[in-house]
Amino acid sequence: MMKDALLQNLAVPDDGVSCIDLAQQVEKSGFVVVPQCLQAAMVERLSSYLSATTYAARNLLSVPIVRELAGSAPVRVLAETVLGKNCFAVKATFFNKTQEANWKVVWHQDLTIVVRERRELPGFGPWTIKAGINHVQPPAHILSHILAIRLHLDESGPDKGPLRVIPGSHKQGRLSAERVTAWPKAHSIVCTVPRGGALLMRPLLLHASSACVAPKSRRVIHLEFAADELPQGLEWFDRV
């Protein structure tokens, strides 16, 4: 019953939304907005921990409240609907865009995953180290099976630097910088999300955001889920 009630709130055209509708929307467009996901009490708890004066944080799956969030029923419903029951969280980051910590993000794809140790494998690279942890760009077929769930602790309205996306662009694999620059942007969509809502997206979806205009926070917890093991002994850094 909880799953059905949640899915009825999805921002898709059909009146009767099912698991199939959600999965198909993500497959077709590369994203979907869920206006209601987290209960108010959970939003308050997360907001207290990730205050308005915190601007960014990596590797949050080690934090108990974020691990709880990744395994919570509303979030698992969304992840399992797209990836299946065997999926697991592999990454959690936090962003807070305010006038004190403001920025614009150019059009790009999310191309890196976080792993335990470096292994030289065909198709993996370049490698980087962020906060002491190995990051690598994997082959496109691995990225294409990852689902990001962006959970909003504040309303993300038009004046808060919301994400803009280009529907269907996730189907083209990893794009060169030249192809990203040349890609037509006229039909991009602005993804406004209410407080407690979620934006589901494929990492290969072209996306960007402008700087915020309003002085209030735009806090987002960005979770990534996978359902497959990495090849040849490579391991996800986190698994929840």
Image (cartoon, rainbow, N blue to C red):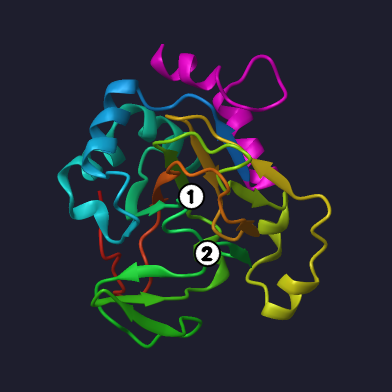
Magenta highlight on residue 25: yes
224 relative to 18 in the view: left or right? left
* Whole-number angstrom distance, CA of label 2 to CA of label 1: 11 Å
Q: Which amino acid does label 2 sit on?
A: Asp
Residue 148 vertical placement versus 128 (above, below) = above
- Which label sits in the foreground, 2 or 1? 2
Does residue 163 show up magenta in the picture? no
Cβ atoms at labels 2 and 1 below 8 Å apart: no
Q: In percent of the image, x 45 and y 30: which residue is there?
A: 195
Name the spot of residue 231 as percent of width and height, x first: 38, 71
Q: Is residue 16 left or right of residue 229?
A: right
Count of numbered tags: 2
Where residue 109 sits: x, y (%)? Answer: 59, 65
Q: Position of residue 205 (x, y in %)?
A: 63, 57
User: The N terminus lies in which quarter of the figure?
Assistant: top left
Q: Mark 1 points at which residue?
A: 147
Of label 2 and label 1, which has the lower sequence position? 2
| Residue at the image point whose x is 84% and y is 54% from the top | 186
Label 1: state its secondary structure: strand
Name the residue located 42 percent from the left edge and 59 percent from the top edge: 101
Query: For the magenta stretch, what is the residue range?
Result: 1-30
Outermost residue toward the top? 1
Tag shown at residue 29: none
Q: Which residue lies furthest to the left in this view?
A: 64
Query: Which quadrant holds residue 169?
Result: bottom right
Q: Mark 2 points at which residue?
A: 110
